[in-house]
Image (spheres, rainbow, N blue to C red):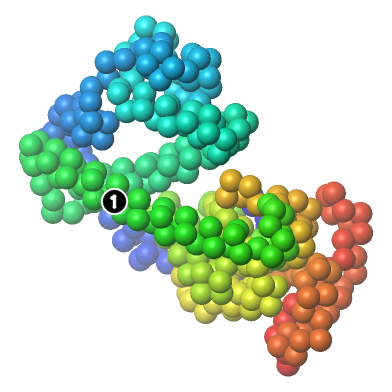
Amino acid sequence: MTRESSGNKDEAPSQEVRDRAQQARDADTDARRRLEREIDAQHLYEEVERAILSSPRLLTRVQVAERAGVPLARAVRLWRALGFPGADDDEEVFVEADVEALRLVTWLVEYGWIDEEAETSLVRSMGRTYARLAEWEVSELVASVAAADMPTDQSQLEELVVSLVPVIEDIQNYVWRRHLASAAGRLLLQPEGGSSTQTAVGFADIVGYTRATRDLEPDELAHMVETFEATATTLVNEHGGRVIKTIGDEILFVVDDPKGMARLALDLVEVRDDDFPELHIGVAYGDVLARLGDVFGPVVNVASRLTSLARPGRVLVDRGMRAALEGDDEFRLRRTRNKAVRGFSRLEVHSLKRPR
């Protein structure tokens, strides 16, 4: 999602910065080519896959469905929902772990923890999340091996990669359990229960992102986005919020306390760091439906539209936020003219600032 603002004053990087970036890219390319000459990529892939999957690919999808006691159509539906490519009935591309995973998912349905509709949504959400994580982990590993002084001997490299798998798996399991405990606390302690709750929703958008994609080198653009995501995520966490997702030049985040959200939004647009991009932010407060790690509802749409209207370095809020903050001396609210935006003919808009 990309929004432009005519008020952006982005400066192009210096020639010295561009030269250093080009030298780094050339060195990385040379290292990758040297690595490719020294290892057998196909054999390395087979060793890595064997370590990850714990067994060779010997089963067809028909055999997996039969062993798990699941109709073939259901097994295929779940496989596709996970984001994996399709396979013919006679292709041996599955392993014993696929059988066990299918049994476990169906166990959740049989014992009433989820219904079949939620089953597909659950595996689709897990598939998307882990696909992005795996892509990043592998790309970082390849870049580290290519750029750093790491072993390039075939056997040493295989040993390195294979030894990393259980370590990364343990870290992921730990992080998942910590987030599971945190999510359980939030949901179980809701005063009224249910999936809909009063929440403040915010969008923070990079000013002039489209122009930056044209003017910056890939490494420079990646550095800007990484700085944006890292700094914004830290601030969101410090204010008791949660990052729902990042969309390239934008993050979607929530804070249960509207005052906490107001403080966070102002802190974000006031970051003073040469590497941190200028932002504009829209915030709305009201009933929000939380489902599978995402948020839905008119409040989310209002926050998105407000972000489109906000000038660089400014925060706009809706009437729900205005009502929640009214009378608080910590903030200064000023109503502007109602705006006609997609989906809303007369959107009530207020600017949010710190007191004079």
Viewer-closest of 286 and 322: 286
Identified by mark 1, the residue type is Asp
Query: Residue 336, located in which quarter of the rendered image?
Result: bottom right
Q: Say above or below: 269 vs 80.
A: below
Q: Give the structural element (helix, strand or loop) at label 1.
A: helix
User: x, y percentage for residue 316?
Assistant: 75, 70
| 81 versus 3 height, above or below | above
In percent of width and height, residue 237 lies at 51, 69
Side of 221 where 206 appears, left or right: right
- Residue closer to the observer: 33 or 81: 81
Can the viewer see residue 162? yes
Packing grade of label 1 (10 A; few <14, some 14-19, many >=20) is: few
Looking at the image, which residue is at 90% across and 69% down?
337
Q: Mark 1 — residue?
A: 170
Which residue appears farthest toward the front when viewing the image? Answer: 111
Where is residue 53? Give x, y as percent.
Answer: 27, 31
Quadrant in the picture for the C terminus = bottom right
Q: Is residue 41 left or right of residue 193?
A: left
Is 300 on the left or on the right of 166, as rendered? right
